[in-house]
Every structure is written in C-alpha cells, then in structure tokens.
Image (spheres, rainbow, N blue to C red):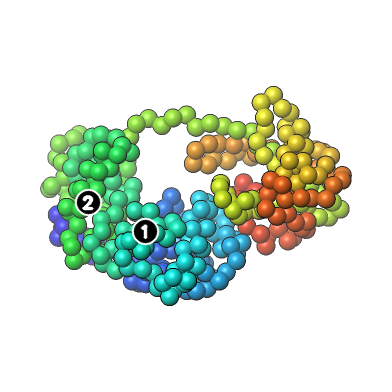
Amino acid sequence: MQNALLQWYAAHKRNLPWRQTHDPYRIWISEAMLQQTRVDQALPYYERFLKTFPTIQKLAKAPLGKVLKVWEGLGYYSRARHLHRAAKEIVKTHKGKVPDSYDELSQLPGFGPYTTAAVLSIAYNKPYPVLDGNVIRVLSRLYLIETDAKKTETKKQLWEYARQLLPANRASDFNQAMMELGAMICVPQKPKCPVCPLNTDCKAFNGLKDPSVLPYSAPKKKIPHYDVVAGLIWNNDKLLIALRPEEGLLGGLWEFPGGKRKKNESLQNACLREIKEELGITVRVNEPFIKLNHAYSHFRITLHTFHCLYQNGTPKALGCTDWKWVTVNDLKKYAFPKANTKIIEAL
Ligand code: SF4
C-alpha cells in the first residue's frame, strides 16, 4: 500500500508552490492557509503573503493590522493572529528558526496536533502522521471505519491506523500523498475507485456498494440565525470605523459599528443602542442601506446596515479597542471582515 501510494503520488501530484520547497516557514504558511480553505482559494493568498512577508523576521516585525490586511477575505482570522504571534515567538526564543521538535513546536500559538505534525513531517521528514479531513476520509474507507469520525474513540482509532501506515523514512511524501489522494481520488462524492492505487486493499471498495457513505458523521445541529445591525456613521464626508478587540471572533479587524439585535427590538433601535454601547456617541439613524446574509462556521447572520448621522459625544473605545474617522477612499487601507467588505463595495 505504501509503495503503491508513493508511486502514484510521484506520478500524479499537483505542482503546488509549497511542494517546491522544504522551507519550514513556507510549509507552515501553506498549512495554516489550507485549514478550512480550498487549494485554489489559498493559492493567490499564499503568493501574496510570502511576497509581503518573505521571512519569519519580516512577519514578526509587521504590525498585526498589516498581516490581517493581507489575510483579508480568507476568513478564520485567528489563523493570521496565531501566525503573527508564533513568528514573534520564533524570532525571540528560537533565533528565527522554526523548531524541529514536537515539544517546542506544539507550544507555539496555532500549532495544534495537526499543524505541528504537518510541519514536522513535511518540512523535516519527521515520522509524525497527520489527520486532516482528506486523510480521515481515506482511512475511514480503507479500513471500513463506520463510527462517527468526530468521536474521540474513532479519532484514536484513526490516529492508530495513520501511525501504522506511515513509513518512517518517507513521512514528508507519504503524508502529502495521503492528503493528495483524498483531494483528487478518494473525494467525498463519487470517489474514483477504479483508478485508485489502494483499491486492492480498500475495504470500502471491496465490501460496500457505495464507499462515499463513509466517513460517517452524525447529523448536524441546526445552525442559529441572528439579525445584526451596522451603522455607517457620517460626519460630513468622514465615516466612523471601530477596531474589534484582538481576542474573539474577527479579532483585530475593523468594522462599521453595530451588533446583534435583541428580542423584540426594532432594527433602528438596535443600531442606536449598539453604537452608544460601543462608542458612547449619539447618532440619528437614517435610511437603510444594504442588507446581506453571511454564514460563519457556527451561525448565520442577516446584516442590516443604516446610514446614520453623527449627533454628539466624543467617541470612546468602550466595546472596541480603537476608532477612526476615515473617508470612503481610505477604507481600503484597513482590514475588514468579509460582510463589511461587501458594504464597502456597495458604497
Ligand atoms: S478504493 Fe475508493 S474508497 Fe478506497 S481509498 Fe481508493 S478511492 Fe477511496
């Protein structure tokens, strides 16, 4: 199985920029980007990120706002904040070299079991197995694992299989080959079993009518929906923007002030209240601007925006960490969450 997979990988792997290098920094950036993001979406971001921050030192020195601006649109912004924090730590404690030991690497921000094992195996060829969505799918089918892949017991079993399969001296290629097989052949729907290098040994292919029923996962819970308001607060030709606290959802990004509507509250009153709570100022809520729907990983929102006229009070960073009056043209200098960039486009 190992030889068959490695041969297939050598012949069929996609020519991706992070496969042209063993530089741990570049591999780390690619792994951070590829979590929750497809390869084609990540590619332009990868090129742009490394052009802006070609070394760990450059990344560590950059202000967080610049890192988030380059990351803007890729989502899951905690990944960018962790990259930035880890780069600072690597420069300070490890002389700018990505550590090659599990203990040291896994201490750094953003290095959970997957990223740690991925960087150690791919960059340093250390024998650590990886378990991402693609590998979980391949292993579940290969070994006919029919329990919920999210359960701890199933995860343990998957780790064990991944460990057993890994050839000690080919960890870099083998882990990438497993991920590539999951991405290109053992795909979620309609896996290409007849051309799969593992089909002779695959239990799902040889024992099930339809291998795509695996991996099994329990039905998803209903995702909650919230109405959220945001005010475009005008003071002559300037707009007021606020910086979200660094910790938490969309931390460190700028936004148009606002927040969640309370039960039975009108959208206009919610806008008035949220702006008062966030910045301590009074505005007049005028006509509605655009309305848009947006999905996050655990909830969905409808974002209602209103043109507002600044009335009185000096803005204070009460529910945010900073605020600024800016022109519409200046908005492009700041990193905003996706829903807010759509407001900017509409403006
Ligand atoms: S034979 Fe089919 S189900 Fe089995 S690993 Fe290959 S593609 Fe996946």
Q: Which residue is mark 2?
A: 162
Left or right: residue 247 versus residue 199 is right
SS state under label 1: loop
Locate residue 278: give its quadrant.
top right
One can see residue 56 in this view:
no
Check the image and report above or below for 172 versus 161.
below
* Mark 1 crowdedness (10 Å alpha carbons): few <14, some 14-19, many ≥20: some
One can see residue 110 in this view:
yes
Q: Which mark is residue 106?
A: 1
Left or right: residue 336 versus residue 286 is left
What distance separates the C-alpha of mark 2 from that of mark 1?
A: 19 Å
Residue drawn at x 67%, y 62% is: 333
SS state under label 2: helix
Closest to the observer, 177 or 221: 221
- Which is closer to the viewer, label 2 or label 1? 1
N-terminal of the two: label 2 or label 1?
1
Residue drawn at x 44%, y 30% is: 221
Closest to the observer, 262 or 49: 262
Residue drawn at x 41%, y 72% is: 94
Left or right: residue 200 versus residue 241 is left
Residue drawn at x 81%, y 44% is: 281
What x and y, as percent, mark residue 157? 22, 43
Extreme residue toward the left, this view:
200
Q: Amino acid at mark 2?
A: Ala
Locate residue 97: give its quadrant.
bottom left
Q: Which mark is residue 39?
A: none
Extreme residue toward the top, this view:
264
Q: How many marks?
A: 2
What x and y, as percent, mark residue 53? 51, 71
Q: Amino acid at mark 1?
A: Ser
